[in-house]
Amino acid sequence: MSRIRVAWFVVFMVLTVTYWGSLNAVELTFEPWALRKSLLYYSGIVAIGMMSIGMILAMRLQGVESLLGGLDKHYRLHKWLGITAVIAAVVHWLVKLEPKWLAKHGFVAPDTFKTPAGTVGFFDHADPFHPIRGFAKDLGEWTIYALIVLAIIAIWRRLPYRSFFKTHRLMAVIYLLLAFHSVVLFSKLGWMSPIGWLMAALMAAGTIGAVVSLAGRTGHSHQHDGQLERIVRHDQDNMIEIHLKVDPGWPGHEPGQFAFLTFEASEGAHPFSISSAWHSDTRDVSFHIKRLGDFTQALPEKLSVGQAVKIEGPYGRFEFEPHDAEQIWIAGGVGLTPFLARLQAMAEAPQANTTHFYLCVRHAETEVVQTIRQLCAKAGVKLSTIVSGKDKPLTGEQVRQDNPDWQNSHVWFCGPGGLGQAVRDDLVGHGLSAARFHQELFNMR
C-alpha cells in the first residue's frame, strides 16, 4: 500500500510544483482575478495530468508494474488517480462558474475577477486556437458531466463486470475529448515552459494509451492462445478447476502470479490467480476459480474441453521472496490459489526455511483442502486449518503466539481485505516491519 501512496503523492507534487513554479509574479498574488485564474488552470492541469497517467497505466506495461510492485497495486493506483482527476475536474468547473454566480447574487462586483487592463502575465501568450476556443470550452463542460457519470458507474460495486468493462472503455473517449479541450485552452499558458513540456509529454503518452484501449490492444504483446484441456468441479469448495495448454510463446510464470482469461470476447478479460507451478514440457496452466459473481457462477455451463481461451500475462509480484526466509502464509476464501501454486513447486523442491500456512476455510474436508494438506506434507510446510463457524477467527495475536520468530518472518496474505488489515495492524503494531507483510490486492475495481 505504501508504494501506491508514494506514487500518487509523487505524481501530485510533480504536477503541483511544476505548475506553480512556471508562473511569474503577476499570477503569484492573492488578487481575486489572479488567484481565480491560477486555480482554474491548476485544477485543469491536475485533472488532465492524473487522467494521462491513468491512461498510461491502462496499457498494462510490465516495466511500470514492476516499479509499483505488482499489477494489483498498479490498478489500485489507477483507481485513485481517476478519483483525483474527477475531483479536480469538478473543482475546475466550479472555479469557472464561480465569478458569474458570485456576481449574480451580489456577493462581489461584476469586475472583481476581471484582469486589469495592461496586465501581461504567464497566461497571456498568443492564442492560435482562438477561433475554436468557445467550442473547446463548451465541449469540456459537457465532457466533465459525462466523466462524473462514468466515474460513478465505475465505483458502483453492484454493476456486473460485463457492464463495467464496456462502460469503462468509454473513459478513453472522454480522455481524448478532454485532451482536445486542454490543448486548445492551454495555448494561453504557453508550451515553452516547464509545465508546457510536462503536459505535452503526458498528453501525448495518454493519447497513445487511449488509442490502444479503443483499438482493443491493451496487453496485446502479452496475450497467448490457450486450449481448455480439463475441467474439474469442486462443489464443496464452490469452485471449478480448469487446465489450459498454452502456446509455446508463454514465458512461464512464478507461483503467486495471475493472468487475464478471455472466454468470450463480448465479456472481456477477467483476472484469475494461477494455481499451478510451471512445467515447460507440459505447458499446463491451471486455475481454481471461485464461483462468486454472475459470470463465475455460470462459467461451468459455458466451458467445454477443447475450447479456445485467450490468456494474457503473467502478471503480479506475489512471489514468496526471499525464498530462504522464514515465512508465514495466510489464505482465506479464493485467496488459497497462489499458495497452491507455491506448494506444488515446493513439493518438487522442498525449501530449508520454515513455513507456517494458515488456511481459513468454510469446510475442512473438501477435495481442495485435502490436496493442500497432501502438498504441505510433501513440502514440509506446517498447516493450520481454521474453519469458520467452528474455530475462532484467525488473529494477529494467534500468529504471534504460534510463531516465536514472527518478527523475522515474511508474512504473505491473500484473502478478505478486512482479515488482512486486522492481522497486519496487529503484527506491524507489535514490531513487524511493514515491508515484511505482503498482501495481494486482487480486487481490480
Image: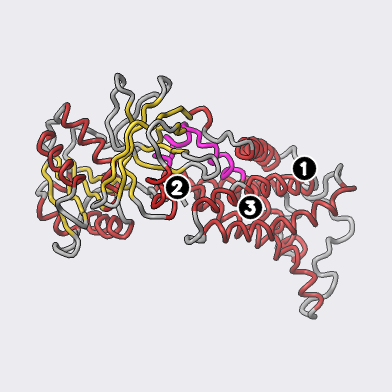
Q: Which mark is residue 6?
A: 2
Q: Position of residue 168 (x, y in %)?
A: 58, 50
Viewer-side label of 3, 1: 3
Helix, strand or loop status at disc 2: helix
Q: Given the image, on which type of amino acid does mark 1 rest?
A: Gly
Q: Is residue 247 visible?
A: yes
Viewer-side label of 1, 2: 2
**Residue at figure coordinates x 79%, y 76% from the top left:** 108
According to the image, label 1 marks what residue? 190
Crowd band around label 2 with a 10 angstrom C-alpha radius: few (<14), some (14–19), many (20+)? few
Q: Given the image, on which type of amino acid does mark 2 rest?
A: Val
Helix, strand or loop status at disc 3: helix
Q: Position of residue 342 (x, y in %)?
A: 24, 35
Q: Position of residue 169 (x, y in %)?
A: 60, 46
Q: Main secondary structure of the magenta part?
A: helix
Q: Is residue 50 visible?
A: no
